[in-house]
Image (cartoon, coloured by chain):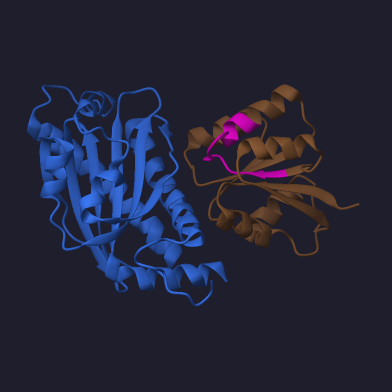
Amino acid sequence: MSTPVLICDDSSFARKQVQRALPPDWDVDVTFAGNGEEGLSAINAGKGDVVFLDLTMPVMDGFEVLEAIKKQDLPCLVVVISGDIQPEAMARVKKLGAVDFIKKPVDAQRLQQVLTDFGIYAG
Amino acid sequence: MRGERMSTEHLDEEMRDVFQEIANVAMGRAADLLARLLNNYVVLPIPVVNLLERNELKMALSSLKSVDSVSAVCQGFVGSRISGEALLIFNDTSFQDIAELTEFKGDITPDIELELLMDIANILIGACLKGLTEQLDVSFSQGQPVLLGQHLNLQDLINNQTGNWKRALTIEIPYRLESRNVDCDLLLLFTEDSLAVLESKVRFMLE
């Protein structure tokens, strides 16, 4: 079965960058969301077993999405992909349950490494 | 849309989106340095991208109120057939907190404010431009930072901004600190002549 993957970022350019960085042979079913609220609905609909989450977004930002996932105990693995590279931002998202942090612009090798590290993708 | 020239009247949605994302990455790097300097978390905004006439410049400074007293520095840049200016505008109420956060002891005179303003301008403008040039694969040389004025209102500040342009692509980045009263606006202006080159660089990134 394909893995449901959600890419949540307010920029369509950034969403495409993440999609292009995914391992080409990874069997996935990709859903896109343009803000945290859309992202959370997609996760609730079972479309985000693996979530690539931006932080700076309108309507509902990435920190709020992580809080909601934690509170509702939603079954998903979240990798934050953000331009906010302050150590404090990284510490906060890890504390909120994100498995890892990738800085923008996303690097395909780094992304694949994270997927392998967490056993999400066998490589 | 491919092959279509970026209109100097309107900014198409795809271009606006890419500029916003590039600015997002660049401002993040600058914010990281500011956070380290001030030992405080910098709240990152969503950059605001516009194509504006000079007389609309006030619209590019949406986070500042016209009654606020502000101080500002401007720094030009040019290279790879792109030219523009970076403006860093501080709300004057910010300086007390900046002085405390940088552990400055003593009276905050206009000279001290100027020093703090120049220091932060160097850090933020330099890091932001570096972030932009790396992503766009261009190189800029930067001019000397120039003081536009201290304790001005927004209109006087805009009147002092005499760069040689009529219409510009503007990117507004309103930084603020999480737990302190520090507000500053970083405004990047790219002149009309630069738009065609910028567009081709962005098209290349989209491929």
Residue under the point 35% across and 63% down: B9
Where is residue B20? Give x, y as percent.
45, 52
Considering the image in quadrants, where does the N terminus of chain B appear?
A: bottom right
Q: At 58% across and 55% down in the image, what residue appears?
A: A12
Q: Where is residue B62 in the image (x, y as percent from the top left)?
A: 31, 39
Please state which of residues B134 and B202 is positioned toward the viewer in this rendering.
B202
Figure quadrant of the C terminus of chain B? bottom right
Q: Among all residues in the image, which is located at the extreme right?
A: A1
When asked about the image quadrant of residue B93, the answer is top left
- What chain is the blue one? B
Q: State left or right for residue B107 relative to residue A55.
A: left
Vertical arrangement, residue B34 with respect to residue A121, above or below:
above
Report x, y in % for residue B84: 26, 61
Residue sitting nearer the eye, A42 or A4: A42
Q: Can residue B129 be seen in this view?
A: yes
Chain in brown, by letter, is A
B188 shown above or below B107: below
Residue range in magenta is A51-65
User: Is residue B55 positioned above or below B205 on the image?
Assistant: above
